[in-house]
Amino acid sequence: MVLRTLRAAIGAPLLALVAWAAGAPVALAHGGTVPLEAPTVSGVLLHWGFDPLVWLPAVAALLLWRAGVRSVNRAHPANPVPSHRTWSWVAGVAAIVVALDSGIGLYDTTLFSIHMVQHMLLTLVGPPLLVFAGPITLLLRASSPDTRHRWILPVLHSRVLRVLSFPVVSWLLFAAVMWGAHFSPLFDASLESLPIHLMEHAVFLGAALLFWWPVVGSDPSPWRMPPPAKVLYVGLQMPQNTFLALAIYMASAPMYPHYVSTIRAWGPTPLEDQQAAGGVMWLGGDLLFLTALILLVYAWMRAEERRTVGEDRRLDAERAAIREREARLAARLAAEAADAPVARPGSGTAAR
């Protein structure tokens, strides 16, 4: 079933290869072309490269989701996939496509500030939307019992996934990826080499998905976090983001030789561009983390309200049961009193 869905969603392999071959020369020319004009809002939004390395996985992800939703809704009409899950999945895929193929992708090797916007979309926007959609739950519901028990559940219960998804490990892994990517030769190398750039994006996405999974995901997870722990988990990541942003912003010299050697007749100096990148990460990142914290606190309050309502209903049911038992006991005592023998005055026997 899963294989048939996969083949139907991805479509004709020959067309995919032709599309890749047509777009590969453009995609492989990474970091070699400097745009002639400074970026504008309309230019960033309207310029699309249609890179098959981006669009083929994105279209496949959307079609697979659609096939899974149709399968679940057809098999369980009384319990369909909520529409907000689908919208979240579409928005998450769209955020990644915008990050990699819009005008952001055109300028990411020319301006560090634009590159930082790309990284934020890949770590703080797209992944939480994808995780919130619940893809693992959809996969479990759309798969056959044999597929679930043979392939999916063993992966979910594997020791590797349990270790990687442990909240302390996923928190540290996300922070380490952010610091390691920006303060190591990997970042500058990714600006010169497409394979390294793709690997960097994959690492960012993987670490971000693991980070957001235990706090916003509806999927089954090896580790359960109570609402207060979720707030603390995300809240501690915000100052880490701030410190990293300030380290970039306050650097006294450009950190990456690629941006220094890039010759352009427009825009800020490399140091000014780097300071702008630090500002984007500081203000934009903290705003996104603060938004996540507000939503988590709201979800916590809703959970407490539901727990309180459930507790009140349980207590009301217990009180009603006690009153019912008291009423039955009173009725039984009244009946026994009515049937009890009445003693006549001056008589040693009771008259019935």
Image (spheres, rainbow, N blue to C red):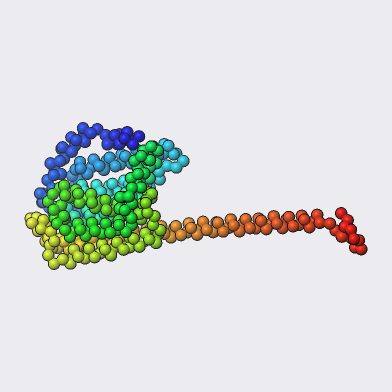
- The answer to whether residue 69 is seen in the rendering is no
* Residue 34 horizontal/vertical position (percent): 11, 51
- The answer to whether residue 197 is seen in the rendering is yes
* Residue 267 horizontal/vertical position (percent): 12, 58
Name which residue lies at 14% across and 57% down.
185
Name which residue lies at 19% across and 57% down.
181
* Rendered view: 269 above or below 138: below
Which quadrant is the C terminus positioned in? bottom right
Name which residue lies at 32% across and 50% down.
159
Name which residue lies at 31% across and 39% down.
63
Which quadrant is the N terminus positioned in? top left
Front in this rendered view, residue 296 or 149: 149
Residue 331 as seen in the image, left or right of residue 141: right
* Residue 243 horizontal/vertical position (percent): 24, 65
* Residue 273 horizontal/vertical position (percent): 15, 60
Front in this rendered view, residue 282 or 103: 282
